[in-house]
Image (cartoon, grey):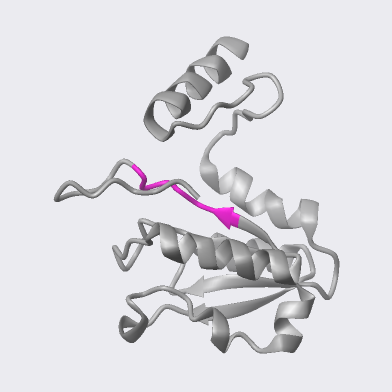
Amino acid sequence: MLSFRKAAADWYGRTMNVNLDPEEEVLTLIGSKEGIAHIPLAFLNPGDVSLVPDPGYPVYNIGSILASARPFKMPLLARNEFLPDLDAIPKDIARKAKLMFLNYPNNPTSATASIKFFEEVVDYASENDIIVIHDNAYSEMTYDGYKAPVF
């Protein structure tokens, strides 16, 4: 319903300071899993690569496989504050990658990402022609005054 999409766009504008057109830029789904699982079908061709966090939501990996693409796991390690090490992604993988999945605030690590990290991701994605999917399901589940940035 347009009234729901308008309410969602209004909420996003109030909380994230991002203006969306409810008719063209807001899509109602049964749940986030539906959207996440179908994004690879829209943007990946057989043999393409998706960059998926590990550990991460299994649907990132499974959706890529269902699209006949090859998931490449980006380890989320304590030594990197549970952020993917973009420099550790082999160049040949980066050239084949079409999607990168991110999830911050992160489940299951509870790690957060800074604006600086998101800027690095934008630069990396721009250099390698990669679409970044930010699964921002936990944006409102923060503590100690932290406000999750919007990718």
**Quarter location, residue 64:** bottom right
- Find the magenta span and give its range: 133-139
Depicted 15 relative to depicted 61: above or below: above
Q: Going 50% across and 50% down the picture, which residue do you hit?
A: 151
Depicted 69 relative to depicted 103: above or below: below
**Quarter location, residue 115:** bottom left
Residue lying at the far right of the rendered structure? 46
Residue lying at the far left of the rendered structure? 144
Is 127 magenta? The answer is no
Residue 87's spot in the image, x, y percent? 56, 85
8 relative position to 128: left or right: left
Q: Going 31% across and 68% down the picture, which residue do you hit?
A: 109
Is 134 magenta? The answer is yes
Q: Would you say the magenta stretch is mainly helix, strand or loop?
A: loop
Depicted 58 relative to depicted 93: above or below: above
Front residue (pair 123, 13): 123
Locate the N terminus and report the quarter of the image it occupies.
top right
